[in-house]
Image (cartoon, coloured by chain):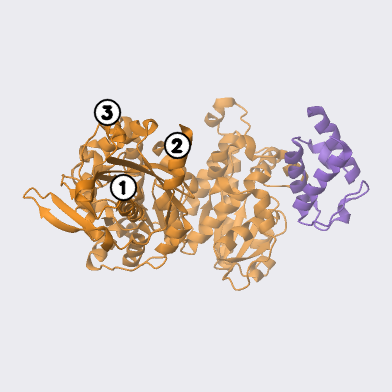
Chain colours: A purple, B orange
Amino acid sequence: MTDTDLTKRLTDVFHRTFDDDRLTLSRTMVAADVEDWDSLTHINLIVEIEREFGIKFTTREIAGLTNVGELMDLISRKAGLIA
Amino acid sequence: MVTNLNYAELARAGKKPAGQDLPELRLALLSDAATQLFVPLLRELFRRHGIRLEVYEAPFAAVELEVFNPSSALYRFQPEMIVILNATQALRSTYFQQGDTGAALAAEVEERASGIWEAIRGNCSALVIQSSYVMPYERLFGNYDLKHADSLYDAVAEINRGLCRRAREHKNVLINDVEAVASWVGRRTWFDERFWDLAKSFCANEHLPAVAQNITRIALAARGRGIKCVILDLDNTLWGGVVGDDGVSGIQISAHGDGEAFHRFQFFLLALKRRGILLCVCSKNEHAAAIKPFEEHPEMVLHKEDITIFVANWENKAENIKRIREALDIGYDSIAFLDDNPFERNLVRSILPDVVVPELPEDPADYVKYLAELNLFETTAFSQEDSSRADLYRTEFERRASVAAFASFDEYLASLEMRICVARFEPSRLGRIAQLLQRSNQFNLTTHRYNQAECEKMMLDADCIPLYASLRDRFGDHGLISIIVARRVQAEGVLDITDWLMSCRVLTRGVEECLMNHMVAEAARLHLKAVCGHYIPTAKNAMVKEFFGRFGFEKFEETPQGCTHWRLSVADYRYPKHYIQAEMEEAALAAESGQ
């Protein structure tokens, strides 16, 4: 999986989850940047990402994320292990 | 339909504003779990039932604070219903933190719950919808857990029994059996402890809709919605086989072997009837043949008295259901229609969209399990009158009768995109053709039982026109549905139809009209002046006695045995309208190119 692949698929997940097609992801983006991104919609986001990439996060991983960049690295590490 | 609900779709749909013109339901959510994710789901599910949901979410884990304070935001909201949703995860931490015995915990939880219900009753008239607790997955003693009153596992089982026992004494309380929903899907996937730890989410996202669905059903039932009447097909729905063809002794309904699935299904229906659900029959059959198993078959579970309205005729089922509804004077949305035939299901769905028409599983062995999963028969009360309701209605119906015309049936037929393929007998089809010739009884004009060798002979005879027809529509392929054998008698200028049979499953949708048009056109193409037809009565084919008369044939002879002979002048034929596209040429071409 290339970085552009991942960005595209992750962007789709964000669009679906927050029902907003205008969202553009950046590595420094944080929850406060997105309307509706709170601890509960975060669950929706995580579940959608897990389904999209066929991976499963641990509680610690979910809790430890601080921005989109880290999320991308984590996905790429976990999905990479499976592929 | 629990299994069809997709969380993400439902959640998205629930964020859109519901129509302001819809009637409102004010519902409060109190929970020791997070309720936020439920709100869009509930909103969407109620919207689908024509209700605009106004929700009040109490602050997290503030059940007591809200209910014991008469001026709380909860009471200011003036809820019609209060949903109390308790999470096993919260109970688990109480159990471990307090270090109580399981029995003590159970007593405390019950006491607390009934205190809450009473406080609510003292402050408002809202209906309380109290959840049961989902059984925990851990079993400290293994199988011994249930023998040991102190285990969490046994405590939860005890709490659920206790809540139900106490709810019986509180008129304002209904039980939302979340444990039943969870055990259906299984505890293994039900809990997602990561999201409980991070955000106090009630269960795995994918199962949230099932909880919301359960709440919706209870609320709708409390509002008087729900199924009051089940309308049943007979052949291959209530028993195995076709009674008109196989006879009373030929149908499968015995308690063992191939009839057991139907036996079980009938017991389920009988239990529903005793619960106050009306059972009606709507079958494409001769009335006399259809009623016979109810009167004569020793192993039938359902009897004539169990059926409120019994309709067996050859008219379209939507029209029959319309008449049943009028007679019962109930809403379409309180009727469920059960039929194994997809054509009938789709017909009823498209003409009467409010009638609940579940898909039935292919295997009758799964009927009861499938219907149980749909949970169609939610109610909020049960009384003595309910169990005798069926009988009251039956007397009422016997006083009244009504006939209503159906304007949109033509539209429905047109929408089916039916296509018929008529072709001469061909070697690969002879087996199936001979089989239909042996089996078909009701729509069979002369009932000649040709075997495969005789069919082959006809196929090779140049003066014989042996045809089969197969039907397709947008819902699928019905396969071979009709056989017509005609003979060209050039000297007399006649096309003589010696055989005509059809599968009863495809009646009243224009197949007869389409095929008759085809036969008369064929006569004209061969420069024949007339078409002849014959009817030989049997014990089972009364329904086609006047078949040729319907198309303007004149009866020119009738024997003492009741055989009739008919004749039509090709020039006088008025081609009746139908909604089927014939594919004669294509099929012929296909047959040639295939050789």
* Residue depth check, mark 3 versus mark 2: number of the one nearer the observer: 2
Q: Mark 3 lies on which chain?
A: B
Residue B465 percent across, percent down from the top left: 30, 42
For marks 1 and 2, give the CA distance. 31 Å
For marks 3 and 1, give the CA distance. 26 Å
Q: What residue type is labelled 2?
A: Glu
Q: For residue B393, what is the image quadrant?
A: bottom left
Q: Which image quadrant: the N terminus of chain A?
A: top right
Q: Earlier in the sequence, mark 3 or mark 2?
A: 3
Q: Mark 3 points at which residue?
A: B453
Q: Which amino acid does label 1 sit on?
A: Cys
> As displayed, is residue B558 above or below residue B107?
below
Q: How many neighbours does mark 1 have within 10 angstroms: few (below 14), some (14-19), or many (20 or more)?
A: many
Q: Which residue is drawn at 45% across and 57% down?
A: B349
Q: Which of marks 1 and 2 is nearer the N terminus?
A: 1
Q: Which residue is drawn at 22% across and 57% down?
A: B568
Secondary structure category for the residue under label 2: helix
* Residue B213 relative to residue B332: left or right: right
Q: Mark 2 points at which residue?
A: B592
Q: Mark 1 lies on which chain?
A: B
Q: Which residue is drawn at 66% across and 52% down?
A: B9
Residue B384 percent across, percent down from the top left: 33, 57
Query: What label sits on residue B504 in the rendered view?
Result: 1
Secondary structure category for the residue under label 1: helix
For marks 3 and 2, give the CA distance. 22 Å
Front-most of B368 and B240? B240
* Residue B344 relative to residue B118: left or right: left
Residue at the far front: name it.
B491
